[in-house]
Amino acid sequence: QGVGRCPAGLMRKVWCLHCFLLQNRPFLVVWNAPTSRCRTAFGLPLPLEPFGVVANDQEVFAGGNITIFYQHQLGLYPHYQADPAPVPLPVHGGCPQNASLRAHLDAMERDLEAAIPSRAFSGLSVIDWETWRPLWVRNWDKKGVYRTMSAHLVRQRYPTWPQGRVELQAQWEFETAAARFMSETLRLARARRPGGWWGYYLFPDCYNYHYWEDFENFTGHCPGIERQRNDALLWLWEQSRALYPSIYLEEVLRGSAQGERFVRAKVWEALRVAELPASASYSLPVFVYTGTWPLKGAGTVLGPRVTVGSTCLKMRHYLLSRLGPYVLNVTTAAALCSRTQCNGHGRCRRRIPDSPTYLHLEQQEALGRDFICHCYQGWQGDRCQERNQDPRPTPPAPPLALLTLCSLSTLKVS
C-alpha cells in the first residue's frame, strides 16, 4: 500500500485483505467531501471516477472507503460549548477528568455499530476531536477554557492550596484523563473494527505558524520544542493505525516558497512521528488533509451539507478544469515511474528530498535521473527487483514531495 505496509507475522495475509484501498498504489486521492447532494438535489454529479479519485459509494460522507466521526458522533466526548456565555457550559462533563470514560465507551460501541455495521470495514477511519488538545501547554486562546476549568475543579477540592500547586495538579489531572480518553477510544475502535485505519484528524502537527514573524526568511521548520512535545505523545501514536495531519494554507502562503516550506515541514514531521512507535511492525501510513476549494474567496469551506447548486457548479468546473487533470497526471506519472523504475514493486521518491522536482507526465526524462525506489513490503534492491525473505519490514522512505509521499491527499470540505 501507500506509505505504511501491512503488518508482518501470522496476520499479514489477513491484514493485507483489508488493505485493498491502499495496496501497492504509489499515489492515491480520496474524496472526503459531503457532495452527494450535487447529484441527488441538483442533478450535477461530480466527475470523480474518470480522474481516478476514490470516493465512498454515492459520495456519502461516511462509507466503506472513509468515515469521519465528529465530536457528537462517537461516544460522549467531553467538551465545553463554543457559544460565548458568562460561564462555560460543559457537555458530558466539560473536561475529560470530569467525565465518565466508561459511559463514553459504552455509547461509542453503539455509535460504531450504527455507523459501521460491518466488522469487515477496512477504510480510513478519522476521529475529528478539536475542542481540546491532550497536552496542557497546547490549549491556548479559546482552548484555554480547559486550563481554567481544570484549575477550577482542583480549587473546589483544595481551596487552601497555593495557585502554583493548583496549576500543577490541574495539568496532571487533565493530561492523564485526556490521554486515557483518546487512547481508550482508539483501543476500542481497533478492537471492534480492526480493519479500519484509525487515527485523529490534525495529529500530528508541528505548529510552524511563525511565518508572520519574518515572512521573507521563513524556513518552515518545526520548532524543536514542538517535536519534543510530539515525542511525548508516543502513547497516542502507539494506539493509532494512521496519521491524519492537515496542511491547510492561509492565503498569504498559497503559491509561495514559504508555503512549500510550511507544507514540507509538516509532512516531514508526520513521517518522523510515523516511525516512533516501537511496538508497530511497520511505519504508520500518513494521510494528509488539504483544503483546495477556490470558492467565495480565501478560506471558504463547505458546511456539513451542500445546499446551493452554484457551489456544485463551481466544484464540477474546478474538477474538470484543474484538479481532475492534475490528479490524473500525477497518478499516472507515479504509476509509470513505479512500473519503469521499480518493476511495479515500489514507489518513486526524490533522490534529493529538497529538490524542486515532481512526478509529472511532462517530465518523464526526470524519472530515472531524479527519483529512486522505495520498495513495497516483500521487495528489495535498487529497482525493487528482488524478493525480500526477511520478515521484518523495510525501513520507511524519507519524504520527497507532498503528493508522491503521502499515499493519500484527502480533499476535505467541512
Image (cartoon, rainbow, N blue to C red):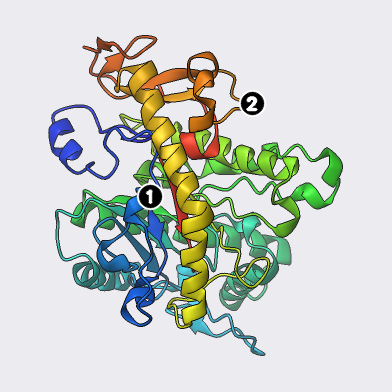
Tell me the residue at 64%/24% (across/down): 355
The correct choice, above or below, for 348 with respect to 233 in the image is above
Give the SS element for disc 2. Answer: loop
Asked which quadrant contains residue 137, the reply is: bottom right
Instruction: Check disc 1 and give the amino acid type.
Output: Phe
* Whole-percent x, y for residue 108 in the image: 28, 69
* Residue 176 appears in view: no
Instruction: Check disc 2 and give the amino acid type.
Output: Asp
* Whole-percent x, y for residue 376 in the image: 31, 24
Residues at marks 2 and 1, CA–CA distance in whole angstroms? 28 Å
Asked which quadrant contains residue 341, the reply is: top left
Number of other residues with Cα within 10 Å of mark 2, as a class: few under 14, some 14 to 19, many 20 or more: few
Q: Is residue 310 left or right of residue 16?
A: right
* Residue 261 appears in view: yes
Q: Which mark is residue 51?
A: 1
- The reply to whether discs 2 and 1 touch (Cβ–Cβ < 8 Å) is no
Tell me the residue at 23%/12% (across/down): 387
- Which residue lies under the disc numbered 2? 354
* Whole-percent x, y for residue 386 in the image: 26, 9
Tell me the residue at 25%/19% (across/down): 378
The correct choice, above or below, for 131 with respect to 376 in the image is below
